[in-house]
Amino acid sequence: MKKLLGILCAILLIAGTAGIAGAAPCTWTDTVDEDVYVALFGSYSYTHDITDDGFVPLVDLATDYVLTIGLYDDNRGMDEWFFAEFAFVDQPGLLGDESYSFAYENQDFGASILGLVQINLFGTLDVTIQSLGGDFCFGQSVLTACGESNSAPVPEPASMVLLGTGLLGLAGYGRKKFKR
């Protein structure tokens, strides 16, 4: 009977230490804040890196992202040739590519499948802004990625109760053993 009780306590102890939650919801952000002039038919490329915000490639999982870009008129006189500026935002894949509407101060762009692949493999996202008409300035770009963080496991409350029960059982078993 004592051996059975000892084995049961050991099993409870092992089961209590093994149970941890695997993933926690998380959001990672990266900001590229530069004042860069983009000439007529010119382009500007940059890379967002969310590993600076704690994202661990191939461990954490980004399931979605939003790219917010702010372009503004440069007022340098090139606009007299064109009535408005036209810009094209290019990110990995075809789904996230869109034209930029200068009617808004900042514009959000959705995720592309290849963009998600690049974020999950490397923690980076490459973006290119191409002028298709007029000239303008790049002001700011913010990448906000959402997903699950697997790099910092959190113990589950039930596992901690199981661990505590196993420790109490071992303490009680050991106390009985040494009393005799």
Image (spheres, rainbow, N blue to C red):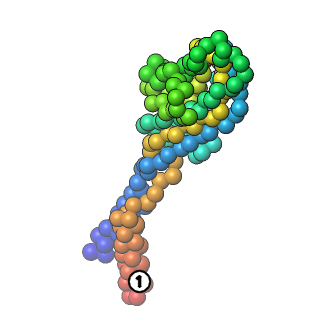
Left or right of residue 129, residue 35 in this image: right
Give the camera-side residue of 138 and 9: 138
Residue 105's x, y, as percent? 56, 34
Give the camera-side residue of 169 and 119: 119
Residue 93's x, y, as percent? 48, 20
Q: Is residue 64 visible?
A: yes
Residue in the image at 58% along x and 46% along y = 54
Residue in the image at 71% along x and 18% along y = 77
Give the camera-side residue of 172 and 91: 91
Residue 79's x, y, as percent? 65, 17
Give the camera-side residue of 167 and 36: 36
For the C terminus, the quadrant is bottom left
Residue in the image at 43% along x and 22% along y = 95
Type of amino acid under label 1: Arg
Left or right of residue 159, residue 120 in this image: right
Disc 1 designates what residue? 175
Residue in the image at 47% along x and 48% along y = 26
Q: Is residue 47 visible?
A: no
**Figure check: 2 above or below 12:** below
Location of residue 88 by image quarter: top right
Left or right of residue 76, residue 104 in this image: left
